[in-house]
Image: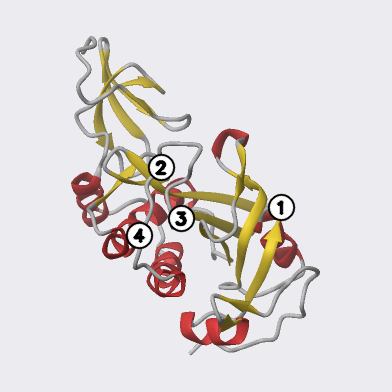
Amino acid sequence: MTSRAPVPPSAGEVATYDGRTSGALAVLLDVPAVLVFDEVGSTLDVAHALGERGEPAGTLVLADAQTAGRGRMGRSWRSDPGAGIWLTLLERPAAAESLGVLALRLALAVAPALERFAGEATRVKWPNDVYVGERKLAGVLVEARWRGPRLDWVAIGVGINVRPPAAIDGAGLASTAQRVDVLAAVVPALRAAARATGPLVDDELARYARRDLALGRGCTEPARGMVAGIRADGALLVDTATGRVACHAGSLVLEPENSLGSRP
């Protein structure tokens, strides 16, 4: 079992999460500590403060609501109380070699962990999202911090919709899903994925292909063409009119499944 080094309370921290104390959650999830908040700007910011303060790998931050949750490309949103699971996991990888595939690895770990709570098959969308059908269920965001040339820690932010968000066409979990049960499935999966090293291996690529939301579909970003999968280094492969390209950054924008748009 993980050693239980105490973490001093932080401003705004509360005692329980769905009736479980922070200490009970730490034991259940086998992590050094859990910090629970009624509301924060972003759990990522709290985790970075903990990383700077030297807290151990596996420290988990949970919030019932966020006023400035973060996503890719600098996007920000409000996460309403009880509407989802908003967490950040602090990890301290031994090396930076796997950062380029970490978000993919984490999304691939989260997808099967969520499937039994969603009541439907889950799929992954490059580079970091989990979907049910055509609707987003969860997203992963990784932020790294360095001390000189050395990677010091990564903050792994995960947002999971418990109920579908009203403002966008997102998915939610089944009405019977309990947040603590979801955490018990998701957190160990995240920790295992964060410990993996090197590029994606053949088994990971095969599992990704089976869940790939975009495979064989037309896209307009980050390149126009047809999605051909991913590479071991995490690059998105797109067959364009002039040949296959590998995209390392950007957002994947798909054409509707019934689109009759041009193909390469």
Which label lies toward us, 3 or 2? 2
Q: Quadrant of residue 7?
A: bottom right
Q: Position of residue 225 (x, y in %)?
A: 28, 18
Depth check, front residue: 189 or 242: 189
Q: Amino acid at mark 2?
A: Gly
State the residue at coordinates (23%, 9%): 262
Vertical side of 194 occupied by 76: above or below: above
Tell me if I can see residue 80 in this picture. yes
Depth check, front residue: 184 or 117: 117
State the residue at coordinates (41%, 71%): 178
Q: Are marks 1 and 4 in contact (CB under 8 Å)?
A: no
Q: Which mark is residue 109?
A: 4
**Disc 3 versus disc 1: distance between alpha carbons?**
17 Å
Which label lies toward us, 1 or 4? 1
Q: Earlier in the sequence, mark 1 or mark 4?
A: 1
Mark 1 closeness class: few <14, some 14–19, many ≥20 residues within 10 Å:
some
Q: Which mark is residue 41?
A: 1
Which label lies toward us, 4 or 3? 3
Q: Position of residue 185 (x, y in %)?
A: 37, 71
Q: Earlier in the sequence, mark 4 or mark 3?
A: 4
Q: Amino acid at mark 4?
A: Ala
Q: Earlier in the sequence, mark 2 or mark 4?
A: 4
Look at mark 3 in the image and give the residue it sits on.
160
Look at mark 2 in the image and give the residue it sits on.
170
Q: Earlier in the sequence, mark 3 or mark 1?
A: 1
Element type at mark 2: loop
Q: Are marks 3 and 1 in contact (CB under 8 Å)?
A: no
Q: Are marks 3 and 2 in contact (CB under 8 Å)?
A: no
State the residue at coordinates (24%, 11%): 261
- Position of residue 144 in the picture relative to residue 180 (left or right): right
Q: Amino acid at mark 1?
A: Gly
Element type at mark 4: helix
